[in-house]
Image: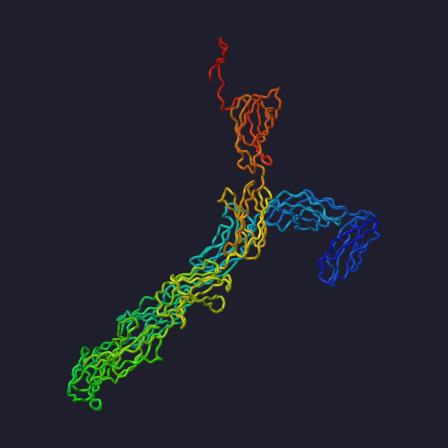
Amino acid sequence: PDQVENLTFSNVYDTSLDISWQKPFEINGHLISYELEWYQMNNTQTNLSDRSIIEIESNLTTYKINNLSATTWYIISVRAKTRKGFGIKRSASIESGYPPEMPSPPTNLEIISIDKRSVIIKFSPGYTGKTNILRYIIQIQMRSNNSKWENIQSFNIEQSKLIVHDLYPNRLYRIQMLAVNIKGISNASIPTEFFRTKPDVPSSVPQILLAQAINSSAIRVRWMPIATNEWNSMSSTGKDIGYILSINDSITKNIKIEDPLKTEYIFNNLSPANTLFLIRLYTYNRIGMSKTSKETIEKTFENVPLRPPSNIRIDSINGTSARIRWNSLNTFDQGGFITNYKIMYFSLLSSQIIHIIDYSNNNSTISYILNNLDGYTNYSCSISACTSSGCSTYSQPLIFITDESVPSKPTEVFFPDVDHWSARMTWQQPTKLNGILIGYRLIYWRSDDEQTRIEIDNLTSITNSYLVNNLEKTTPYTFILCAKTRMGCGETSINRLLTMEKRDRPAAPYPPTIIESSINSTSLILTWRKDSDFNYAPIRYTLIEYEEEHIISWKSYDSINKPDGQITKLLIQNLKPNTKYRFRLASQNDMGISDYSRATNYIRTKESIPLIQPKIDYILTNQPCQIDIYLKDFGSIDNNNNNTRLKVLIKSISNEQIFQKSYHSINEDYSIHLNNLCQDSTINDTHVLYVCLSNTIGDGPLSFAKYFHIQSSTPTHISINSLNVSVLSSTEILVQWNINQILPSISYRIQWITANETNKQQNLIASYNESNVILNNLIPFTIYKIIINIFNINGDGSIRETDLVRTNEDVPGPIDQLTFSYVTFTSLQIDWQPPKSLNGILRSYDLTYDNRLSFSSLINTSSTRVKTIKQLLSPNITSLRIDELDPYQYYEFILCACTIQCGSCIHKSIQTGPQKTSPLPPYDLFINKHNELVWKSS
């Protein structure tokens, strides 16, 4: 158990006394009993047998001791006991027959050593009160008229030096002591003079440190400033207290912020992107740096890759395929996680047709096979790497050539000249040669007898017609024509012919039919019959035209790749979504092109998802709980859907929550404004944002990602209920306030400024758990305006301003200047300037002068008498003529300015009579016959 409490004596007689106590504050178990012990104090022969020890039940706290020796000093002690054993003894001494008296306080207190958080105090013990001093109580007072004396330490010792701990650095204190004996507590001693503890490094660092990435190479760091009283040092230059920031980017040195009120810094030029950085914040003063730091981590945002993939190699596989390979980017250049690669390629023969392939793979070495290439063709190929934030530039184009392959079939195959026994066949070279054209091969036979097959293989590459003779009259024939490269014969063109002279262009075909189930947003299937009259000349090709509603103009569909006459169905592609079309056909044979068929009815393609990928120009997050998104102009919506809206998807990347979705109409400046975002986010979450176009069919392609932080709100919901100021003295004002909600995330900024010096504002920071501060070192008798502002790491909240308040008057400063003029033998004039610091209302000047200094003067005569003159002068004068002085006497003048009291005086002495700057005396003085004084001037 702990020590027993409040050990006291009563009814003290020569041979007996009563003792009482209270049970310990902390018993720490089950109290069993007390042990009481007493023995004579100065008996050097005392042994255990001379000690009296008795055990007292736990429910008793008093005992009467008998059989004491008269007028003898005894030490009496009591201790408590639990099952674990005895606690510490509580002891006191007393002389039998002499009841204890109140002690007197220690005297001659002197501070002999001052440290940062402790001092050593020397003192002389006072009167003990006929018993021993149980302990000394140390009280301290900080320098302020409003500060109270506080008990900080109690010493159970009797010595003349004590160490006082738990002081704050760089504070003004004074100390007083009280003595405690069995009777009670003495009065307080005479306090020491005020002393200042030594400065120390700052005692704390900001407890709230927030780092938020701004982009892929910058992090904004903010913190709550520490309270003014935690700097532990006075700033002499304004630059010797502040903050030190460090970041582990291996380039940036420690950043020294020489402003204790600054709460923000931005680290720029960080690399690489999407990297986690450790940030430390220290405080410092002229003594040194804080012993601890506040740490936080933050990752920079993703960025587009800094450069495209490198080491691109392309190997041709065959005439239609090539393998492309490249190396992945190094970590520094990636800008984040590589999500996909874009491969752009095109034939140098048709550079307007560009193919882009989106390929997702993240192996260290990447490859992809390009298919459906043209043989023996030069291609340009470039690669771009992409992250969620966008794609890099494309690599330098790499030119490669595919292997030679067989060509496509000849085009525009006709039989313009036909009679009963011969036919001339014409053609054009294939659209895709896929190699070096070396000639053509023609095979024909009577359609009902393949034994009549004839093959002609000597047609050159420049041949585009051939005359076939020895045919049979009115007989059907089959002709097969193919082009040849060095790789062989390519796709064949199969054509049928009837040998007869009477032929004509075909009649108009039947109108085509659209398969309803084939209609999509950009394609449909068109079918037609081929049993129309072709006038004995087989249909070689079908021509297709289409027309959009509201655009009265027929357009040809793919005039280069016309369907052969044997084809009766075709997939029509590259149509516009949600658009009305109609179609018509014409047939082409050897004799010409028929009239066009009747057009189909208008049909509407289906709606599609939006095809445009929005591009986010920039976002603004400088308003609390709000984000403003600005998109680049994407022109008109290409799906003719009036229901198209902008869809925004937002989520925090620090957890696996689903996207929050919102829909917005498209306005003129392509902007989106989102509010009330703080409800579902924490203060330092990194969020990712995507935008897409959306309609009733679905969502279009997502924009590239934008990363951001939601700025939390300032403490505008916390209001200052009351604000009171009290003038404590000429240099101190007590500011007290009360708010409706106390949060650890806030602090207070108290600002004060004199009414006539609006550019000299001073600031003090108070922590969230404070409700008053004392503004000190103010100017006496000066009007101040005081402002208190609640703020947090995001900015300022409520502001409250007090009425103007004036500090009390104080003694004025010294008179600035005292001069003598018009000095004669018996008079002089004094002039002075009022004090620069009046510190109140100037009520008078106090002037005293005497000739006391003349007693030691060589010119002094036995007739000299000391004269002391005192005058109270009006505060409106600064000049005075003094007469009736004695010649050649030394006078000392003492002048003081007075407000509520007189301030320090100025002392100045002078001797009447000629001065150093006086003229020389006249000479040749005489009285002429007219009784006139006559002299000559010097």
Place of residue 766 in the rendered image (x, y in percent of width and height, measured from the top left): 56, 52
428 vs 133, left or right, is left
Place of residue 601 in the rendered image (x, y in percent of width and height, measured from the top left): 30, 77
Place of residue 119 in the rendered image (x, y in percent of width and height, measured from the top left): 63, 47
Q: Nearer the viewer, residue 576 or 336?
A: 576
Place of residue 584 in the rendered image (x, y in percent of width and height, measured from the top left): 27, 78
Q: Quadrant of residue 35?
A: bottom right
Q: Nearer the viewer, residue 699 or 277?
A: 699
Q: Tell me if residue 817 comes above or below residue 1 in the rendering.
A: above
**Can residue 501 be seen here?**
yes
For the point 30% across and 72% down, the residue is: 549
Q: Tell me if residue 34 comes above or below residue 882 in the rendering.
A: below
Q: Tell me if residue 884 comes above or below residue 186 in the rendering.
A: above
2 vs 463, left or right, is right
87 vs 673, left or right, is right
**Can residue 201 be seen here?**
no
